């Protein structure tokens, strides 16, 4: 007797499906979990309801909308673990300045010159670039949380937002109530601290107390340069101030010792690895392989447009592997890079129960990567390891064709459906001119 298929909302059908899902008890399984080709993912009410071989899923599920994924890969949405979206207005403006001068002469004057409207415009620009690059979730650090939240809500993306605490408490006291005020399940908050060297210790201690009382994660730059570590702004000091614990997101963690790695792992904190930004600024390269071997959850970040000039996690995956192989000591492969950009990045943000892999019950955050371009030839679809290598070493942001967040198609055929690209770019140019002028950077 034939079984009538159940009704879903959307089918992503016939693709090379990389689940990144490791079932309980499968700790020894490779980081990509199962691969299905041809595979299909069924989505209903914003969640994944089925994933598996195309014939099986499509026999059990029907949908009014179907995205043909033949000659394409279907992946979990990418997770950008550290970014300053509103700094998208600073692309190309900081020149070759080293980090300390970049912050002092460009970033901090620009931040002081911004207002809510400029932040909203700039954050929309950052969201547009990220969503078109397959980034469905990001962890942001900047002031004007409500303005950033408006931009994220309009774009349809998922985000964890944190303030940019420097000399004063800013939005710290209002932070615990922010998520309830936004009333958006795709928006979360974290306590953001620029760094130990940029935040007075009394404020850092108060931030730690707020985070503990409200059960919020902490997002901060840490051990990014040799100079800050030499000045005593170390992982041990972060720990002593009560800032290192489960849910703490350490951006960069370039200059950490083996003892630091063990401490980070023991406290349950995670690291957002930013190889592109660190390379451009000449601050060094985090030992991602060693951090992972020490038991630390490691995700990837693009950092700001003032440091990296682009929000492309395909770049970061490729760089993470290339830098890991320096001196012939590499331990990471394409599957590890994909894990850092998806499930491990979600784990760093404490969201791995919701996103980061393709499994029934998870939120439907997915991307479709077009593999039809001749650059991918000969595309050995019968050899999963070869396709995974293509996704990391060949693919780039421009190959992202479709993006789904919470079951909603926010990018279709490389065009955003929620934001008008031309309008966003025009508004960004006007805001950049105004803020750069006010900051004395025009």
Image (cartoon, helix red, strand yellow):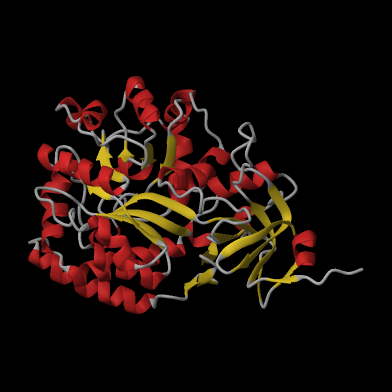
- Residue in front for this viewpoint, 286 or 297: 297
Specify whether residue 281 is in view.
no
- Residue in front for this viewpoint, 12 or 437: 12
Say above or below: 157 vs 194: below
Q: Residue at x 48, y 59 (%)?
A: 134
The outermost residue toward the right is 1
- Image quadrant holding the C terminus, namely bottom left
Specify whether residue 70 is in view.
yes
Q: Residue at x 32, y 75 (%)?
A: 424
- Relative placement, left or right, of 263 versus 404 is left
- Relative placement, left or right, of 161 versus 405 is left
Q: Residue at x 43, y 75 (%)?
A: 418
- Relative placement, left or right, of 142 versus 367 is left
Say above or below: 236 vs 22: above
Q: Residue at x 66, y 68 (%)?
A: 11
Residue 324 in which image quadrant: top left
- Residue 30: image location, x then y, percent: 62, 36
The outermost residue toward the top is 259
- Image quadrant holding the N terminus, namely bottom right
Residue 275 in which image quadrant: top left
- Relative placement, left or right, of 147 versus 324 is left
- Residue 417: image location, x then y, percent: 47, 76
- Residue 40: image location, x then y, percent: 70, 61
- Residue 102: image location, x then y, percent: 17, 47
Tell how many labels.
Answer: 0
- Residue in front for this viewpoint, 296 or 68: 296
């Amino acid at each position: 007797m034939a079984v009538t298929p159940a009704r879903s909302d959307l089918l992503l059908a016939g693709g090379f499906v990389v689940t990144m899902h490791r079932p309980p008890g499968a700790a020894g399984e490779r980081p990509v979990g199962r691969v299905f080709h041809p595979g299909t993912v069924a989505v209903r009410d914003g969640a994944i309801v089925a994933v598996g071989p195309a014939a099986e899923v499509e026999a059990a599920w029907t949908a009014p909308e179907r995205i043909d994924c033949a000659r394409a890969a279907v992946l979990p949405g990418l997770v950008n673990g550290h970014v300053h979206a509103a700094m998208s207005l600073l692309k190309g403006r900081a020149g070759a300045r080293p980090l300390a001068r970049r912050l002092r002469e460009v970033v901090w004057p620009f931040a002081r010159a911004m207002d809510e409207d400029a932040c909203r415009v700039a954050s929309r620009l950052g969201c547009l670039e990220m969503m078109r690059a397959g980034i469905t979730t990001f962890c942001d650090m900047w002031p004007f949380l409500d303005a950033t939240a408006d931009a994220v809500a309009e774009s349809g993306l998922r985000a964890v937002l944190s303030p940019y605490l420097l000399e004063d408490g800013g939005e710290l006291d209002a932070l615990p109530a922010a998520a309830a005020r936004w009333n958006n399940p795709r928006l979360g908050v974290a306590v953001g601290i620029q760094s130990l060297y940029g935040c007075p210790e009394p404020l850092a201690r108060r931030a730690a107390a707020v985070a503990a009382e409200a059960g919020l994660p902490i997002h901060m730059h840490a051990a990014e340069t040799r100079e800050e570590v030499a000045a005593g702004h170390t992982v041990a000091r972060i720990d002593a101030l009560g800032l290192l614990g489960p849910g703490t997101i350490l951006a960069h963690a370039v200059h950490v010792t083996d003892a630091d790695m063990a401490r980070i792992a023991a406290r349950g904190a995670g690291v957002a690895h930013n190889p592109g930004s660190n390379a451009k600024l000449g601050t060094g390269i985090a030992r991602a392989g060693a951090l992972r071997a020490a038991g630390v959850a490691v995700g990837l970040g693009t950092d700001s447009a003032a440091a990296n000039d682009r929000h492309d996690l395909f770049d970061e995956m490729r760089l993470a592997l290339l830098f890991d192989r320096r001196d012939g000591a590499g331990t990471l492969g394409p599957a590890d890079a994909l894990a850092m950009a998806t499930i491990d990045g979600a784990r760093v943000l404490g969201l791995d129960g919701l996103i980061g892999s393709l499994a029934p019950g998870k939120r439907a955050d997915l991307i479709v990567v077009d593999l039809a371009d001749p650059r991918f030839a000969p595309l050995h679809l019968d050899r999963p390891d070869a396709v995974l290598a293509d996704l990391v070493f060949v693919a780039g942001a421009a190959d992202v064709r479709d993006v789904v967040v919470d079951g909603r198609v926010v990018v279709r055929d490389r065009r955003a459906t929620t934001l008008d690209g031309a309008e966003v770019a025009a508004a960004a140019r006007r805001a950049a001119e105004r803020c750069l002028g006010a900051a004395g950077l025009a």
